[in-house]
Image: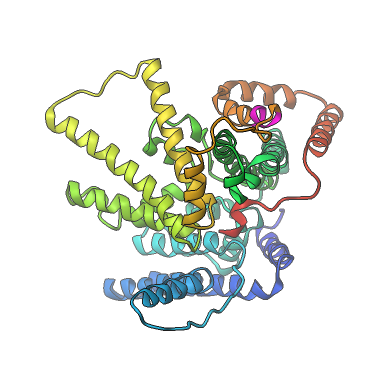
Amino acid sequence: MPSPRRWRFFIIAASFVFYAWWDWHFVALLAGSIVGNQLAALLIYRAPDQATRKGVLAVAVAGNLGALAYFKYYDFFVSSAAQTMERLGIAWVPHIVGVALPVGISFFTFMGISYLVDTYRGDFVPVGFSTFAAYLSFFPHLVAGPIVRPGELIPQFATPRDPRRVDTTRAFALIGGGLFLKVVIANYLASRIVDEVFAAPERRSSLEVLVGIYAYAVQIFADFAGYTNIAIGAALLLGFRFPQNFNNPYTAVSIQDFWRRWHMTLSRWLRDYLYIPLGGSRKGRARTYVNLMLTMLLGGLWHGASWTFVVWGGIHGTGLVLEHWRHDRRVELGLPEPADTPLRLWLRRLVTFNVVCLAWVFFRASSFSDAGAVLGRLFTGWGQPSPLVTTGVLAAIALGLGIQYVPARLGEKAMGAFSRLSPVLQGVALGVGLMVVGVMGPEGVAPFIYFRF
C-alpha cells in the first residue's frame, strides 16, 4: 500500500470481483448503493439549510430501505397481506417476484445509512468517491459484517498500512480460531443433531430436542462468531482494524448484558440509529418501553422475512422491557440492587441463557408450527431412546460454552508465546492447526448462517 489512492482502486476492483463470484448480476446493486449514498451524502453536506438537509436524508434513507424491502421483504409482505385478506373472505392472488436475496445487502445497506446519518449529524465529513467505495465494498466485511461505522474504517484508508506493524499473531489467532468454531464445532453440531431435531422433532425424544436446542445456541454462536473472527483477522492482515463483534455472549447475566456482547456492531447500530432517534429513554418510562420493543421487533425483522424472526425479536424486547421495569420499580421504591453473589450471578446466567435459547427456537424454525412442534416435544417424549445425544455432541456443546469462560489474559499469553517463535515454527504450528481443522471438520463447506441475512 505505498500509494493509498492506487491501493483504493485496486481493493475496490478486488472486492467487486469477490462479490461477483457469488452472482455477477448483483454487482450493479452494490455499485448503485455506492454511487447513490455518496451523492446523497454530498448533497446533505452542501445543503444550504436544515430543511433541505433533512429532506435529502429522508429520501436517501428511504431509497436504501426501499431497495432492502424489495429484495428481502416484498414477497413476505405480499404473501402476508394475501393471507390476511383470505381470512377476511377476500380472494386475491398476489404476484410473487421470487427474486434472490443479494448476499450482504442488509450489511452494506446499514453501513450506507450510517454514512448518511453521520454526515447529517455533523459527525463525519463526506470523503472522496474512491474512499467511500472502498469503505462500502471492502471484502472482509462485505457479505456478513461486522457493521463498521465510517469513523471506524475510513480514516484508516488515509495513510499506508505499514507491513512491519501488522499484528499477524492476532490475525492468525482470529482466523484459526474462527475456522475451528465454524468448521469443527458449528458444522459438527448442525450435522449430528440440530438439523435432524428441527427437521422432524416429532421423531425425536424430549432429551434430544432439549439438547438440540442448546446445540443450536452453540452452533449459531460458533458459526457467526467464527465468520466474524475470520473477517476481522483477514482485515487485520491487511493492516486494518475492525470493531469487536462478540464478547462471550453466553456469559451474560441479563438480556441487556447479552446484547452488549452478541453481534455488538448491530446492537450499537440499532441503539444509535433507531432507538435513540425514536426517543430513547428521554420521553418517559412508557415511551422507553415502547422504543425498546419497537427496536427489537425491527431488529428481528432485519434478520429475515418471516414472522418467526419478529417473535424472536419480541422475546428479547419483552426481556429488555421487564428488566428496565424491574429496575425502575426498585428505584421508585428506594430499594437497592441485591448483591451479586457468585450463586446469584450463576442463576442470572442460567435464566438468561435459557431465555435466549427459547428465542433461538423461533429464529431457527421455518414457521410457527415448526417452532410449536419443537417446544411441544419437550413435554411429550421423555424416557424414549436418544441416539442423537452422544458424547461428541455433549463435548462440542461444552466446548462451545466453556471457551467463553476462558480468561482473556490466557489468550493474550498464548499469542505472546506464538509471536516469539521463529517464522518456521510459526508456519509449522499454523499448518498443524489447519490440518487438525480439516481432519475434524465434515466433508464440504457448509454455508454460513448469516450469509442469508
| Residue at (47% x, 44% y) in the render | 376
| Residue at (59% x, 59% y) in the render | 452
Q: Position of residue 93 (x, y in %)?
A: 47, 83
Q: Position of residue 101 (x, y in %)?
A: 59, 68
36 or 201, nearer to the observer: 201
Q: Looking at the image, can residue 282 be seen?
A: yes
253 or 33, nearer to the observer: 253
* Chief SS of the magenta region: helix
Number of marks in the rendered image: 0
In which quarter of the view is residue 139 placed?
Answer: bottom right
Q: Position of residue 338 (x, y in %)?
A: 26, 21
Q: Is residue 411 left or right of residue 297?
A: right
| Residue at (40% x, 23% y) in the render | 347
In which quarter of the view is residue 415 placed?
Answer: top right
Q: Is residue 232 left or right of residue 270?
A: right
Colouring used for the render: rainbow
In which quarter of the view is residue 16 placed?
Answer: bottom right
| Magenta segment | 392-396
Q: Is residue 449 left or right of residue 337?
A: right
Position of the C terminus, as image quadrant, is: bottom right
